[in-house]
Amino acid sequence: MKRFMALLSIISLLTVVLAGCGSTAATTASNSSEKTVKVGIIQIVEHPALDAARKGFLETLAANGYTEGKNLTVDYKNAQGDQSSLNTIAQQFASEKPNLVLAIATPSAQAIAAASSTIPILITAVTDPVAAKLVTSNEKPGTNITGTTDMNPLKQQFELLKKLVPQAKKIGVIYNAGEVNSQVQVKMAKDVAAAMGLQIVEATIASTADVQQAAESLVGKVDVVYVPTDNMVVSAAPTVLQVTNKAKIPVISGESSVVDKGALGTIGINYENLGKQTGEMALKVLKGAKPQDMAIESQKDFDTVINKTSAALLGITIPDDLKNAKFVETK
């Protein structure tokens, strides 16, 4: 009987041990089944709008269970405005083949599109994906690319310009002539201006080093300066504003980060929300949706932002129908 009881105890002990091992094996298998998603992010230059789009994108991934260090690896690279660096980054991503790439701004999107036709690419802060030759059409991209456009409500922006500066006749536009999204915006600006009886005066740049000279060339020639969502110009916005403030020339911007720095106002894109919208599209791609079948999306609601400090500096009275705008002050 004693031998039987001893044998029974050994069997029970083995059963517990084996059950524990089985549980550990099951847990290990469960943990290993959660695959890590790798996302590459390619950005042409640092400035608040593009940074906000990246922030919104990552916030959406995090809110939907993708945690860096656990099941998400983010490889963020910024070309700091250098086209050669941009191409190198794109080639690196093409070689590494992440699960998807977020391309922020038109030059970034063009670089990674040229480097890979197979990696799913999500774009944001791209004004005209068709003109940039990234997609066949906005409705059905037909390529490995989809995402969001930051096409500006130019008509509304020029209507804001006329409300704030009703005497304006000549509008200066500073832009990089080599950037497709800027070319598109300037063409639209000319059409909108012509319909409103306004004249566009162009000042083109090839690098941020040209911005001050371009701004100074408009002094005495224009009543207002319009800054489109041009990556070079926006990144050098303080230089533009230094010149225009001294000359008491109001600046209307294509997006709100320039208003924060001292431009008079805008009706524009909320880039953090645009990034979040792009993140929602990325979630669908990670679940198996094909970019070529996903329409390019745009933002439906725009923010009206006015800088009270600049209005006071320029002696501009805010009309009553703009009292519900978001007001900021230059610090």
Image (tube, rainbow, N blue to C red):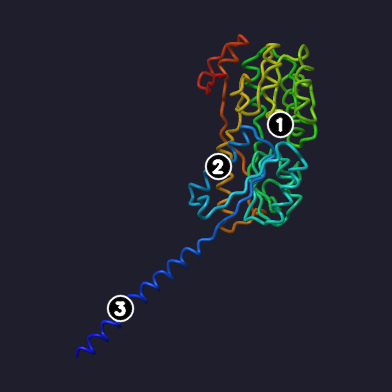
Quarter holding the N terminus? bottom left
Numbered tag placed on residue 276 in the rendering: 2
For this orientation, the residue located farthest to the left is 1
Residue depicted at x 68% and y 11%: 248
Looking at numbered disc 3 in the image, what kind of residue is underneath it? Leu
Disc 3 to disc 2: CB gap under 8 Å = no
Secondary element under disc 1, as helix, strand or loop, is loop
Looking at numbered disc 2 in the image, what kind of residue is underneath it? Lys
Q: Residue 171's image quarter? A: top right
Establish if 122 lies above or below 314: below
Secondary element under disc 2, as helix, strand or loop, is helix
Looking at numbered disc 1 in the image, what kind of residue is underneath it? Asp
Local packing at callout 2 (Cα closer than 10 Å; few below 14, some 14-19, many 20+) is many
Q: Which residue is mark 1?
A: 230
**x then y, percent, for residue 81:** 73, 36
Establish if 143 lies above or below 170: below
Local packing at callout 3 (Cα closer than 10 Å; few below 14, some 14-19, many 20+) is few
**x then y, percent, for residue 136:** 74, 49
Q: Nearer the viewer, mark 3 or mark 1?
A: 3
Q: Which residue is mark 3?
A: 13
Local packing at callout 1 (Cα closer than 10 Å; few below 14, some 14-19, many 20+) is many
* Front residue of 216 and 220: 216
